[in-house]
Amino acid sequence: MALEYTCEDCERTFVRPGWMGPGPRVCKGCQNKRYLARLGPEGRARLYERKRLRAKASRLRERIRLARGELQSVEARLEAL
């Protein structure tokens, strides 16, 4: 059973599952805006820096995984000679 609410900030209608109970009366977008406002400029900078570094680490892990596969194929070809 879903319950329909109206956001206190933007007055959009949103739905929450009934089993979640009475929660915040703001939609997810406004919850995120409130969270970012509460962090302040330094907190937002740290948040975005962590996000940027996690993405970079993910790209590097993918490159390492591909390089390992390439190395194994070259080693297999070398063994075949």
Image (cartoon, rainbow, N blue to C red):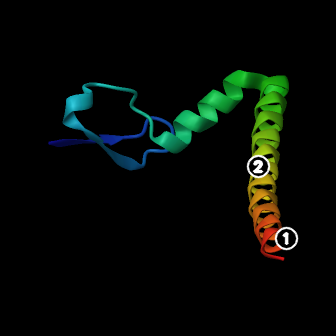
Q: Quarter-wise, where is residue 80 in the image? A: bottom right
- Residue that appears at 14% across and 42% down: 1
Quadrant where the C terminus is found in the figure: bottom right
- 38 relative position to 3: left or right: right
**Is residue 37 rendered to the left or right of residue 28?**
right
Looking at the picture, how far across and down is residue 69, in whole percent? 74, 62
Which element type, helix, strand or loop, lies under badge 2? helix
Task: Check residue 55 in the rendering and tell me which mark sits there, or answer none.
Answer: none
From the viewer's side, name the closer residue of 65 and 3.
65
Mark seen at residue 61: 2
Out of 10 and 43, give the one closest to the viewer: 43
Q: Residue at x 43, y 45 (%)?
A: 11
For the residue pair 75 and 47, the one nearer the viewer reads as 75
Residue matched to label 1? 78
The type of residue carrying mark 1 is Leu
Residue 65 lies, in percent from the top left, at: 74, 55
Mark 2 neighbour class, 10 Å CA radius: few under 14, some 14 to 19, many 20 or more: few
Q: What amino acid does circle 2 point to?
A: Arg
Q: Are marks 1 and 2 in contact (CB under 8 Å)?
A: no
Q: Secondary structure at mark 1?
A: helix
Left or right of 3? Residue 57 is right
Residue drawn at point x = 80 percent, y = 68 percent: 79
Q: Which residue occupies 76% across, 32% down?
A: 47
Above or below for 25 versus 62: above
* Distance CA(mark 1)–CA(mark 2): 26 Å
Left or right: 34 as drawn, with respect to 60: left
Judge depth for marks 1 and 2 and give the one in front. 1
The percent coordinates of residue 16 (x first, y second) are 30, 40
Question: Residue 23: x, y in percent?
Answer: 34, 26
The crowding category of the residue bearing disc 1, from other C-alpha atoms within 10 Å (few below 14, some 14 to 19, many at least 20), is: few
